Amino acid sequence: MLYMRNWQAAYDAATGLLPKYELVDFNASPESGDLPWKATSPEAILAWERPFGGGNGDLRGASILSDKILGLLDEATDNRRNYLNPVNAYDENWTPTLLGYCVNRSSSDRVSIRIAEMYLIAAEAGSYLPAELEKAKGYLLDLKAKRLKPEAMETQRTKVGAMDAEQLRTEIADERARELIGEGHRWMDLRRTTRPAIVKTYKDRTYTLNANDARYTLPFPQSAIDSNPELND
């Protein structure tokens, strides 16, 4: 319903789940098994897929966060920064060079759908329903209160409380980027919302996806079209 922009149905489905599951409070130093990307977490609704992992503190298997995503996580106030690992490269003398950060997750972690996303869906869908706008702000703040340090919340409540619907949606998009790192949502979130330009550099080559690029829609493979000609219709 979220992807179809059926806001009322998305709002009703998400808010209907909120009382049934518990958000993990990152201020309370949760046990490892309670963390949201664990199948045993009280946040878990469905836990099948492996999230992107963090490697071993170097390049082996690490998915390095972009500067944009890292910049959204305030080191002074956001407890989610505690669950990032530095990624290092080493020269012939084993001197480390910091390349960036990745999420601290293992190959045994599993996460598909969890209640934090339902708070974000309730907030986003509610922002499109004028009668639910204030409740939508509350759902976003409920999640923030479990992730940010207590001293940050007064500022957040003032900031979010003053937002109009469009500003709230921008903040929700940023919160999805903070909360759902490595869980497979980012591409679809960009595709279904603003479709911004993306520039990546790899081995001295730069690759650009333009804003609203046609490549935001992934085509059917040619082999599938050859076998099913009506896919072109």
Image (tube, rainbow, N blue to C red):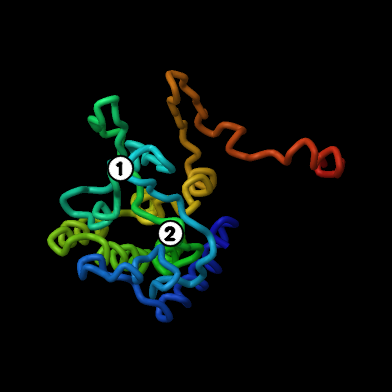
Amino acid at circle 2: Glu
Residue 73 visible in image: yes
Residue 124: assigned label: 2
Percent x, y of residue 210: 51, 28
Q: Is residue 130 left or right of residue 10?
A: left
Q: Secondary structure at mark 2?
A: helix
Amino acid at circle 1: Leu
Residue 130 visible in image: no
Residue 70: assigned label: 1
Q: Is residue 90 left or right of residue 196?
A: left
Q: Secondary structure at mark 1?
A: helix
Q: Is residue 24 left or right of residue 226?
A: left
Q: Residue at x 16, y 58 (%)?
A: 152
Q: Is residue 213 left or right of residue 94?
A: right
Nearest the eye: 148 or 184: 184
Query: Which residue lies most toward the top here?
Result: 204
For residue 11, above or below residue 101: below
Upstream in sequence: badge 2 or badge 1: 1
User: Within the image, what quadrant is residue 229 found in?
Assistant: top right
Q: Residue at x 53, y 67 (%)?
A: 8
Query: Which residue lies most toward the front here?
Result: 93
Quarter the C terminus occupies: top right
Q: Nearer the viewer, mark 2 or mark 1?
A: 1
Quarter the N terminus occupies: bottom right
